[in-house]
Image (cartoon, rainbow, N blue to C red):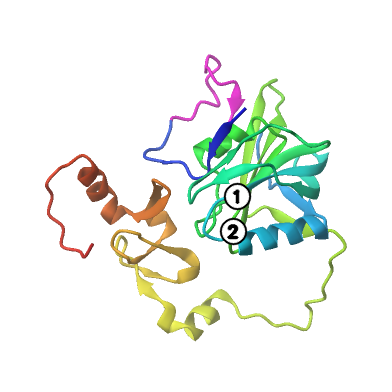
Amino acid sequence: MSWLVIGRGIELKEKKKEWSIPEAENNCVREKCPEMSGKIKLIFSMEAFAKIVLLTKKISDYEWGAYLVGEQKDAKTFYIKDLVIPKQKVSRASVEFEEENFPENCIGWIHSHNSMRAYLSETDISTASVYKVSVVVNNDLQFAAGCKLQLPCGRIGILTTESPVIEIEGAEVDTSNIEMPGEEELIRASPKDLEICPVCNQKVSPRKGEICEYCGELAHRKCGKFYHGIFVCDKCYEIVKAREKGAVIEYDGIW
């Protein structure tokens, strides 16, 4: 049996929030429910985390997926002991598991977004309703996660967290002797890295921005969106859609 999970969905418009609609067809609460708050916590064994690091290095240009073996500690805390990699076919924007052989003590799954931002797309959120926990990671080892919560109303909530709390079992390091610069000092120290966002005309650093794949400019993440799996700034978004429909448009940028 073959099933396909698209890693990065196309988020064209903001969907209507249905958490407060009793007659909603989907009985899963996804966003804005007042009962859902806090961050998801992921505790990895050293072996599991090492496998993730190796996978992001060995398969850096494509997505990959694996089952998570471990246990749920509490509603939002998950211990991940190991990764089990099933037979799969991968591309730059999707991963296809060719079999559904869930390992013993499987609590969820993880897949990569390679060089893109780590977040749960609409497809990922739907997939999260199948597992106790779903995890996304990119090549920079940035994580996002989603988990199921039993709500007082009787429905199931899907809590999503960008930048969940990450711990590695048995790993401790004393950082008291390291004095790190504040955000303002860091920006002042690297003026050459700052660029002007083409959308809001404000300064943006590579750490807080994405390169638009169409105009090639660095833009704030809030000033763009992922379209067909690639980041597009808001300046180019309507132009890209119009081009796909065959419309004739004028554009003063460089393609």
Q: Residue furthest right?
A: 170
Which numbered disc covers residue 8? none
Residue 33 visible in this rendered orientation of the protein: no
Side of 105 relative to 146 (left or right): right
**For the residues bearing labels 2 and 1, Cβ distance under 8 angstroms:** yes
Which residue is the site of mark 2?
59
Query: For residue 111: magenta?
Result: no
Dot 1, crowdedness within 10 Å: few (<14), some or many (≥20)? many
Q: Is residue 125 above or below residue 200?
A: above
Of the numbered discs 2 and 1, the one sitting upstream in the chain is 2
Task: Give residue 153's position: percent from left, percent from top.
Answer: 68, 21
Which residue occupies the foreground of this view, 184 or 162?
162
Helix, strand or loop at mark 2: loop
Task: Give residue 144's position: percent from left, percent from top.
Answer: 62, 50
Query: Which residues, given as a range, are shown in magenta?
Result: 16-33
Q: Residue at x 88, y 63 (%)?
A: 170
Gap in Å between the C-alphas at discs 2 and 1? 7 Å
Q: Is residue 113 above or below residue 1?
A: below
Side of 131 relative to 5 (left or right): right
Q: Residue at x 43, y 83 (%)?
A: 191
Query: For residue 27: magenta?
Result: yes
Amino acid type at image mark 1: Trp
Quarter holding the C terminus?
bottom left
Which residue is the site of mark 1?
64
Q: Residue at x 58, y 31 (%)?
A: 3
Residue 194 visible in this rendered orientation of the protein: yes
Helix, strand or loop at mark 1: loop
Amino acid type at image mark 2: Ile
